[in-house]
Image (cartoon, rainbow, N blue to C red):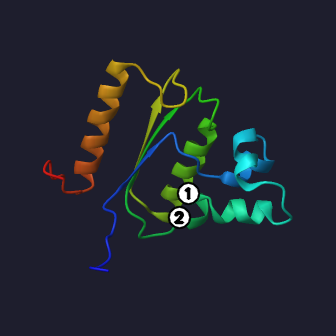
């Protein structure tokens, strides 16, 4: 291996932050249950797969984009993630797409989101190389 690569930032586009919530919580989803299956340690396994489990000081800055009407991954995941990031002192931005579902936004909204992501990455000092 040539060396390790460290992420400069994370862009979370309607992402799951709590897998346990999706397999055995108020936002249970059949698709998530099928990932893990029926097993005695399913909740513990789901927690170990959840980004919320790994939030700590030193995590790269996070930009979260999430529609507040998302039926696939509850908007509460974005809210809880932001809270955990703030508590840990991790630089982050949370962009709410009002009336938005699970990432299928119209062209104008998508262009606005991309601009906001770019601005957020620049504001936290992530070097953006258009040649990559």
Q: Which residue is mark 2?
A: 55
Say whether residue 34 is left or right of residue 104: right
Which one is nearer the viewer's eye here, 29 or 85? 29
Q: Position of residue 48 (x, y in %)?
A: 65, 66
Q: Please, is residue 79 above or below residue 20 in the view?
A: above
Q: Position of residue 85 (x, y in %)?
A: 50, 57
Do we see residue 6 in this rendering? Answer: yes
User: Dots 1 and 2: beta carbons under 8 Å?
Assistant: yes
Q: How far apart in space, not on screen, are marks 1 and 2 (Cα)? A: 7 Å
Residue occupying the point 61% across, 58% down: 50
Say whether residue 122 is left or right of residue 90: left
Q: Please, is residue 103 above or below residue 52 in the view?
A: above
Which disc, if any, is residue 123?
none
User: Label 2: how many residues lie within 10 Å, few (<14), some (14-19) or many (20+)?
Assistant: some
Which one is nearer the viewer's eye here, 67 or 90? 67
In the picture, residue 75 is in which quadrant? top right
User: Label 1: how many residues lie within 10 Å, few (<14), some (14-19) or many (20+)?
Assistant: some
Q: Quadrant of the N terminus?
A: bottom left
């Amino acid at each position: 291996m040539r060396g390790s690569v460290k992420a400069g930032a994370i862009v979370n586009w309607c992402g799951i932050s709590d897998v346990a919530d999706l397999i055995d919580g108020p936002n249970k989803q059949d698709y998530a249950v099928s990932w893990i299956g029926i097993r005695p340690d399913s909740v513990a396994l789901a927690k170990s797969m959840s980004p919320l489990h790994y939030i700590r000081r030193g995590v790269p800055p996070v930009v979260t984009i999430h529609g507040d009407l998302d039926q696939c991954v509850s908007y509460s995941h974005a809210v809880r993630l932001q809270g955990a990031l703030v508590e840990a002192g991790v630089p982050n931005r949370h962009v709410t797409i009002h009336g938005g579902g699970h990432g299928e936004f119209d062209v104008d909204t998508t262009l606005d989101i991309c601009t906001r992501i770019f601005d957020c990455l620049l504001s936290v000092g992530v070097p953006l190389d258009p040649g990559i």
